[in-house]
Image: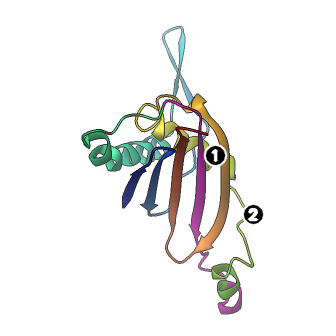
Amino acid sequence: MPIKYEETEKVRRILMTLYGNPVAQGRPRFSRQGGFVKTYDPIKSKAYKALIRLELQPLLAKPGFRQFENPCRVHLLICRAIPSGFSQKKRKEAIEAKIRPTTRPDTDNYIKGILDALNGTVLKDDSIVCEINAGKIYSDKPRIEVMVEERLRY
């Protein structure tokens, strides 16, 4: 996963590409232990967040890198695999973004999963995200492209 970190006097920015099929945040699971109810992440969601955190380790270990603490914006491009049942014509339209994925999982579930993975790593807390721009497209190279930007001066 390529990660690019840029810092100027006005803005700090992280650009990263997470290759592979995007995984959306699943519904929380519940189990009963004794008289208590325990909540936990589905296995696929938990593994995907762990993978993202692992890929971020070189950036987090970089001298001079510090977590984003000021209001920031996040841009996400979710590139889903083209369904194998698409005809050649439909496949071409999907690559040209004339056909967009309107099926589940929802875009907001992808957003939740990515923000959870960035929480406590790149972001001090995901509550500092004040602006989100996200979209789903089809691609022959499934991936998620993420940009996190923090304005230092306006």
| Image: 84 above or below 126 | below
Mark carried by residue 102: 2
Residue 107 covered by magenta stretch: no
Can residue 63 be seen here? The reply is yes
Question: What residue is shown with label 1?
Answer: 109
Question: Residue 105: in sight, yes or no?
Answer: no
SS class, disc 1: helix
Give the mark, 1 or 2, whose residue is nearer the N terminus: 2
Q: Quadrant of the C terminus?
A: top right
How many labels sit on residues?
2
Q: Residue at x 40, y 35 (%)?
A: 121
Q: Which stretch did the figure color magenta?
A: 69-90
| Residue closest to the far bottom | 88
User: Circle 2 — which element?
Assistant: loop
Residue type beneath disc 1: Asn
Indicate yes or no whether the magenta region holds residue 81: yes
Separation of marks 1 and 2 at Cα, in angstroms: 13 Å
Whole-percent x and y of residue 14? Answer: 45, 50
| Mark number displayed over residue 125 | none
Q: Position of residue 79 (x, y in %)?
A: 57, 66
- Asked if residue 103 lies left or right of residue 53, the reply is right
Residue type beneath disc 2: Thr
User: Local crowd at mark 1 within 10 Å, few (<14), some, or many (≥20)?
Assistant: some
